[in-house]
Amino acid sequence: MPKKCPPVLFIVYRRPETTKKVFEAIRAARPAQLFIAHDALAPHQVAEFSGRHAEVRKIVTAVDWPCEVHTLFLEEHKNMLDMFTAAFNWFFDHVEEGIMLEDDDLPDATFFPFCAEMLERYRNDERVMSISGSHVLYHSKEFVPKESYYFLSIPSVWGMATWKRAWKKYDGQIKSWPEIRDKKLIYEVLPSSAAAFYFSKKFQDYYDHKINSWDGQWVYACLVNRGLTIYSNKNIVSNIGYNIQDSYHGVQENDLWGNLKLESLSFPLVHPDKVELNKVWDEYGVRVRYHRVDFNLAGKIKWWLKATFPDAYISLKRFFYKTFAPSKYNENNNKLERSLLP
């Protein structure tokens, strides 16, 4: 396989079971630079998780190959947004490009040379912002790429690689959202208005600090900068964090994307002729990953009415609540929803 392993950022917390599996994959890849970010436990978690937290630290520091090891071991617990932002900023203070794995992103051996080749090939191509080990067309029998990879609009962070040049566009607070929202830019870059409305609501929640997340803001950065994400035509990273205690949340139930079978890429890679979005595949990817935009017939009709006649929809909604449910009426909510509609 070509090319040496790029620098790796490994973000861990309190799950020794998954951490050990991912670390073994990193050990097999033997990166020359390994950056380990480990959050401190929240005070109320110390009694229950201190042993598991210490075990994770022991696993990730057992580096037994020639490697320059950097550590970011926090002494005070951070929320998810602050932790991941700090880790990425620290990583890119030292390197220009690299791979990020969380403690439940189990990579196939071919993930590392794939990222190495993609990082080099698109190093100076501002159109490309992210590289993913997921295969969004995994469940599709209709869409089968002939090339080794393809381009979509929304990044996946379950095993990813990127460049410092792209990370500079990240803003965890998404301060530009009001301007982007009012210009309806999300409606221009996503394949359907339903998807744009779904993500607009999400971005509003990030802006209002209602969601403890970091990856939605990365989606935002890629969309507003019209950045492309490279996806492998094989599933070379599997999220193994489902149905066990998650780092920052509770137990996640399995879905279409949890614990997928790992596949291996073939080398040499077959490159696409053009660096461009496949709009049909992009629409499928949004629809299959985000179920809330895949309506039944009644939902599609309701959405068509909302999207086609947004002002009339808001007026009717205002009339209904003022007349029949005045205790639930909130004019600010109506104004906000109108700002998110097309």
Image (spheres, helix red, strand yellow):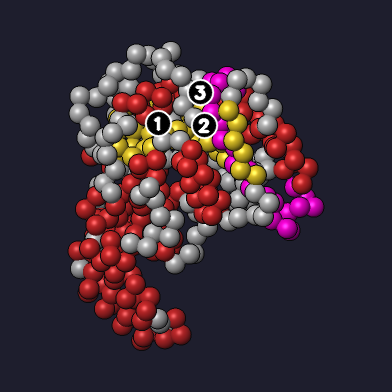
Q: Nearer the viewer, residue 104 or 146?
A: 104
Residues under labels 2 and 1: Cα distance? 21 Å
Left-right relation of 7 to 139: right
Spot occupied by residue 232 in the image (x, y as percentages of width and height):
37, 27
Is label 1 in a helix, a strand or a loop?
loop
Is label 3 in a helix, a strand or a loop?
loop
Q: Which residue is mark 2?
A: 8
Q: Quadrant of residue 306?
A: bottom left
Spot occupied by residue 74 in the image (x, y as percentages of width and height):
65, 49
Which numbered mark, 3 or 2, is in the foreground of this view?
A: 2
* Residue 108's disc number: 3
How busy is the neighbourhood of tag 3: few (under 14 within 10 Å), some, or many (20 plus)?
many
Magenta stretch: residue 48 in it?
yes
Spot occupied by residue 2 in the image (x, y as percentages of width and height):
41, 14
Left-right relation of 112 to 38: left
**Residue type indicated by callout 2:** Val
Which numbered mark, 1 or 3, is in the foreground of this view?
A: 3
Q: Is residue 13 visible?
A: yes
Q: Which residue is mark 1?
A: 135
* Residue 190's disc number: none
Q: Which residues are magenta?
A: 27-49
